[in-house]
Image (cartoon, rainbow, N blue to C red):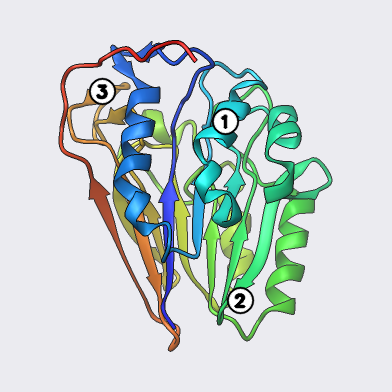
Amino acid sequence: MTVRLLQLTDCHLFVSPEATIQGICTRERWLSVLAAIAPEQSRAQRLILTGDMTHDDLPETYRVVRETLAGWWPQARFVPGNHDVREGIYEHLHDRIQRVAERVVFSEPVEGWQLIGLDSHLPGQVKGELGGEQLAWLADELSRTANRPTVLFVHHPPVDAPSAWMNAIGLTDRDALWTLLRSHAQVRLICAGHVHHESATLRQGVLVVTTPATGVQFTPESETLVVDDLPWGYRLVELHDDGTFQTRVVRLPLRTVCVPLAPA
């Protein structure tokens, strides 16, 4: 059986449905992605959000996440990004996460594969960190499930970004992660967000991909943050019984006008 996954990332939602970033209504784009993936609901085993669910850093914004994903709730899993607030996740998404100390994680088998979500949120910082305790937990999980091909999900990508300013806000302990992964060859794929653009990097035989935001896109190679006019989107991953996989990004038709939504 092929396992079908959807990765969504960097929604940057607000409590206010009309709020914008750089003139872009993130709630409208989020809802357009949910409408586009609606036909997948009956055949996708998981929908995974890899962080920056909120932009206003308000715990109540996670109620918006939960309400808009109501139809997807059995399949939904979450890990936080730098803009997220763990207290809001604990309150509103508690039944779709696990906790390791204060970290928001998940680890579960889906058919013949293992899916593991990691928490790279570093309070008060834009950069990310996994930390020694979480890495020890990951090592235990990988040892326990060594016979399963594995996908990791994390907000901050554990590879170089194409620009210095992005690298400055990257994953600070990525070398420790790669050292750990040398002993766990079952990890085949790492899906990340944070950089607001699509990329693919092969390291130690592991494919690391980043996924476009559901909202605002960034130009990859620039000296500072520059908003790109590429369409927003999501990632589709297909995991096969033989341990191989396929993945691609799906972008929505480009729209240039933000139509404010009626207040909730």
- Describe residue 44's horizontal placement relative to residue 150 as left or right: left
Which amino acid does the dot numbered 3 rest on?
Val
Residue 116 seen in this snapshot: yes
Residue 147 in picture, x, y percent from top left: 62, 86
Mark 1 and mark 2: Cα distance apart in space: 27 Å
Q: Of the numbered discs in the image, which one, if any, rests on residue 82?
A: 1
Which is nearer the N-term, disc 3 or disc 2? 2
Q: Which residue is mark 2?
A: 184
Mark 3 residue element: strand
- Residue 111 appears in which quarter of the rendering? bottom right
Q: Which residue is mark 3?
A: 227
**Mark 2 Cα shell of 10 Å, populated few (<14), some (14-19), many (≥20):** some
- Residue 87 appears in which quarter of the rendering? top right
Residue 192 position (above or below residue 189): above
Mark 1 and mark 3: Cα distance apart in space: 19 Å
Looking at the picture, tell me which residue is in the foreground, 156 or 93: 93
